[in-house]
Amino acid sequence: MKRKEHWGLSKVRKLAVCQFFAMSSFLVVILFNSPLSETLVHVNRERLLIYSALFGFSFLLIGEVVGLFADHHRDLVWKKLCLSFSSAAIGSLGLILVVWLIEFDFIGRLAIFKIVGLSGLSVFLFFLFLIGLNHSNPWRILPLLKKDRLMEIEKSQKLMPNQFEWISYNFNVHGGSIIELSKQKAVDLVLVDKEHQDIDVMALLSSGVRVMGVSAFWETFAQKIPHSEIDKSWLTKLDLRQRDPVVRRVKRLMDLLVSCIGLIVFFPLLVCSCLAIALDSGFPLFFKQKRSGYLGRPYYLYKLRTMKPHSEKDGAQWATQGDERVTKVGRFLRRLRIDEIPQFWNVIRGEMSVVGPRPERPELEVKIIQKIPFWNCRYLLKPGITGWAQIKYRYASDIESSDEKLSYDLFYVKNASFFLDLEIILSTLRSLMKGSR
């Protein structure tokens, strides 16, 4: 059987292709399909190129917010169609505003419709092409794993069912026959566990087969790292780039900028929320709660009060979905995360970052640390108002869900970067639009 080539484009490459299509659509419409009365026809080529790049950037920004580049619905063609045109249409508003500010004139409505239509259609066809490739060419994987380990991977909700084709394997076959089996079955990837480190990796790589450990597989295809896949040697290989003095200062500057702007912009909303809390359940309006911070150091986190007064008179409890302790106003504030606005003050004080692992209460962590190894790895970075686990998983309300959220926090600890932070912030905006938490 002949092995097929995979077009496993990374998200950065997908964004680059979509940027190219958006810019090309803009230039084609203005240069070759616009009347002489159109405003941008008389603009010099350099400025026109800047406008096209601006439209492409706006397209990508809106696309990220509305979820165009999210993988969880990549096989829903109709949704990709709607999001492609919606991203182009909303992104064009930024272009219209900038052109008006610089040229003192508006882009023609017909030109805008053509730009939106052509860019939306070209991006949709690109995604349609990728979806077709995924359906016709799944990853053919030879798993050298125990049955329970393989079942754990196959049941993961974060892995698309049509993304992989698992090749059966007899553990009694000698290591040298793995190469022959890989050639016969056109295997793309051999998935190995710690017990199978004796295989001839170099021979497999030379034959064109990719070899990957379970930890790397989870990280690549599910964007999480279960704690069961890490050990002390994994920790020694961590590249904590955000500990670098330059990176740390840049991140701190961005945190201060975002927090100050956030407090100023949301101040009227904060005042209205305080008034609503006072009318609904009285005082206090705010509350502070001890949390575990950077390197496990405790600090006090500030939030708007969303629960009834004295709701924890019997001690710390998990917050659950539909918690009866939450007030009517508090339920609304939680759904839109308005209750977390005061945490910008924690960021300004240097106790938190805008993006990072969500801080947990020390009282609840006592049980968590006993049952979940490497839990404290989360605090190798500053805790955040939002984070990778918050946008990828539901609200943690017990040990099991905390275990799952830890796997996403470990992914963030290993892969933290400016661009990942930006993706998390934009995805958080998307969750706010949907009213989810």
Image: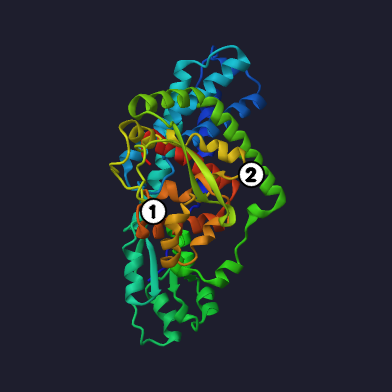
Q: Is residue 286 left or right of residue 416?
A: left
Q: Which of marks 2 and 1 is nearer the N terminus?
A: 1
Helix, strand or loop status at disc 1 = helix
Of residue 133 and residue 337, the one placed in the foreground of this image is: 337
Q: In this view, does 380 lie to the left or right of 87?
A: right
Residue in the image at 49% along x and 52% along y? 9
Up/down of 329 relative to 15, above or below = above
Of residue 295 and residue 415, the one placed in the foreground of this image is: 295
Residue 65 showing in the rendered view: no
Residue in the image at 50% along x and 84% along y? 198
Q: Is residue 284 left or right of residue 30?
A: left
Q: In which quarter of the image is residue 56?
A: top right
What's under tag 2, amino acid-wise? Answer: Lys
Q: Where is residue 116 in the image (x, y as percent from the top left)?
A: 44, 27
Residue 133: assigned label: 1
Q: Position of residue 396 (x, y in %)?
A: 37, 52
Of residue 160 and residue 391, the one placed in the foreground of this image is: 391
Residue 54 showing in the rendered view: yes
Q: Where is residue 53 in the image (x, y as percent from the top left)?
A: 58, 32
> Which residue position holds label 2?
251
Give the Cα distance between marks 2 and 1: 38 Å
What's under tag 1, amino acid-wise? Answer: Leu
Look at discs 2 and 1 and give the one toward the viewer: 2
Q: How is the image coloured?
A: rainbow
Up/down of 417 relative to 19, above or below = below
Q: Position of residue 248 (x, y in %)?
A: 67, 48
Up/down of 173 relative to 11, above or below = below
Helix, strand or loop status at disc 2 = helix
The C terminus appears in which quarter of the rendering? Answer: top left
Q: In which quarter of the image is residue 332?
A: top left
| Circle 2 residues within 10 Å: few <14, some 14–19, many ≥20 | some
